[in-house]
Amino acid sequence: MNFISLDIEFNQPTCTIIQIGAVIFNKNTGEIVDRFSKVIHTSERITPYIEELTGISQEQVDNGVDLKKAYIELCAFKKKHKTHKQTVTWGTGDVKALKEQVTKVYANSGEELVWEFGLRDYDVKTIFQAMRLSKGERTKAGLGTAMEILGLKFEGRAHDALVDAENTATVFLHLLKKLSTI
């Protein structure tokens, strides 16, 4: 069974989407089947902090694709691999923000949005926190720290949406294995 892990990077303080990253992975084999990454065009300036944090330059954003096109391509990517309807995420904010911003784009264009990502996510952060809480252990951790606690190696540059999506998939698979032994 294929799942999609999704991560989004935002400009600040507006929370405008500037990058969408996703990976399709097979739950049974752990294999990454395909990758998706789009830098999103926005007319606002990228803050120096966000440019440094994400590695996404103003030039990349200026030459990025519009959010509607990225969403259409992301939906096609998801459908191509016949993924599970729910999305795997680290935290609950990314899919919510994507839906809010894509809804606005569609409303402004007069077209009806077809939402392809289910009603809820598999929030890996909450699963991780619940497991830690059940053992009386500290629950606060970002993705990289959670991976370190679990004995996993964070691969790539943090705050790149594609990299974070792949690492989120790794944690999800690891936690599923742990849960299967309970």
Image: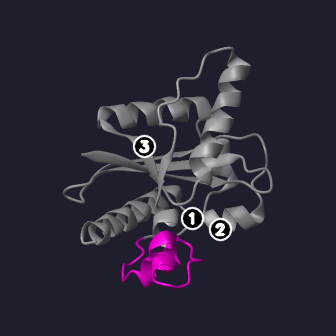
| CA distance separating discs 2 and 1 | 7 Å
- In the image, residue 67 sits, relative to residue 126, either above or below, namely above
Q: Is residue 130 magenta?
A: yes
- In the image, residue 36 sits, relative to residue 113, either above or below, namely below
Q: Amino acid at mark 2?
A: Leu
| CA distance separating discs 3 and 2 | 28 Å
Q: Residue at x 47, y 31 (%)?
A: 116
For the residues bearing labels 2 and 1, Cβ distance under 8 angstroms: yes
Which residue does the numbered mark 2 point to in the structure image?
53
Q: Quadrant of residue 101?
A: top right
Which element carries disc 1, helix, strand or loop? loop
Please tell me how crowded label 3 is: few (under 14), some (14-19), or many (20+) other residues with Cα within 10 Å: some
Q: Quadrant of residue 62?
A: top right
Numbered circle sitting on residue 159: 1
Which element carries disc 3, helix, strand or loop? strand
Q: Is residue 105 magenta?
A: no
- In the image, residue 80 sits, relative to residue 177, either above or below, namely above
Which residue does the numbered mark 3 point to in the structure image?
86
